[in-house]
Image (cartoon, rainbow, N blue to C red):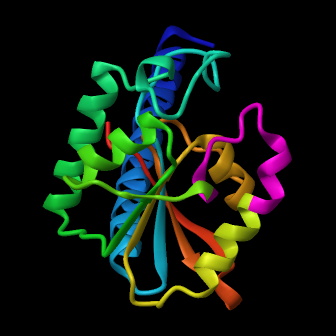
């Protein structure tokens, strides 16, 4: 291969790479637009994993639900992430009729920062790390709740990755929102994913 041919080949690969990156950016922007649209559509609900809370999954051995100081809590970045999510929801005019949260402090604080109000606590959203014996009953309780939900209701559930994965089959990153369409009998199906950076 001559120097000229090598230069042309390199230029072609560079062009292909740029087009691929641009297409990826367009695809991501489209996915974000679809997620915002789904959040506003009747028959859809949102499941959010709490914002950034550093440390290993779960909580210290001696944690207590009535004492946030004994739990894994949001970092300053986690609080900032929740505030960015709140701003994005406001910008896109997404308002929730109901907000339910796990009793764990990191979820309650995330819900408060995202919506600006205290959320109703639901035991069905409780952390399952180290508590797998409650998995089936919590998933059943969540499905029963969804099955009775008015399709026009806008509901945000703030919970833990392990709970959302048990219900929806996808483990979101911290601060991510999974938008679920409610199918027959309230069976949730993931329609979109949304993460505010």
Quadrant for residue 186, please give it. bottom right
Quadrant for residue 30, please give it. bottom left
Viewer-proximal residue, 148 or 87?
148
Magenta region includes residue 133 = yes
View extreme (top): residue: 3
Find residue 125 and report its horizontal and vertical position in percent.
59, 54
Viewer-proximal residue, 119 or 82?
119
Find residue 149 and report its horizontal and vertical position in percent.
52, 85
Residue at the spot 48% in from the left edge and 85% down from the top edge: 43
Which span is picked out in magenta?
A: 124-137
Q: Quadrant of the N terminus?
A: top right
Relative horizontal placement of residue 135, taking residue 194 as reference (left or right): right
Asked if residue 21 is positioned above or below residue 96 in the image, the reply reads above
Asked if residue 66 is positioned above or below residue 93 in the image, the reply reads above
Find residue 46 and report its horizontal and vertical position in percent.
46, 64
Q: Quadrant of the C terminus?
A: top left
Magenta region includes residue 136 = yes
Residue at the spot 77% in from the left edge and 38% down from the top edge: 131
Residue at the spot 72% in from the left edge and 34% down from the top edge: 129
Find residue 75 and report its horizontal and vertical position in percent.
35, 20
């Amino acid at each position: 291969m001559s120097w000229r041919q090598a230069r042309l080949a390199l230029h072609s690969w560079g062009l292909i790479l740029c087009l691929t990156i641009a297409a990826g950016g367009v695809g991501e922007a489209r996915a974000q637009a679809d997620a915002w649209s789904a959040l506003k559509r009747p028959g859809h609900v949102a499941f959010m994993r709490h914002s950034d809370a550093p440390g290993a999954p779960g909580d210290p051995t001696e944690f207590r639900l009535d004492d946030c100081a004994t739990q894994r809590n949001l970092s300053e970045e986690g609080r900032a992430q929740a505030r960015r999510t709140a701003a994005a929801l406001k910008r896109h005019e997404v308002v929730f009729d109901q907000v339910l949260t796990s009793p764990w402090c990191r979820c309650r604080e995330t819900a408060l920062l995202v919506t600006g109000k205290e959320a109703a606590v639901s035991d069905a959203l409780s952390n399952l790390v180290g508590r797998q014996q409650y998995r089936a009953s919590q998933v059943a309780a969540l499905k029963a709740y969804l099955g009775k939900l008015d399709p026009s209701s806008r509901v945000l559930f703030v919970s833990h990755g392990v709970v959302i994965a048990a219900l929806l089959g996808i483990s979101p990153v911290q601060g991510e929102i999974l938008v679920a369409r409610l199918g027959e009998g309230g069976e949730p199906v993931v329609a979109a994913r949304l993460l505010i950076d």
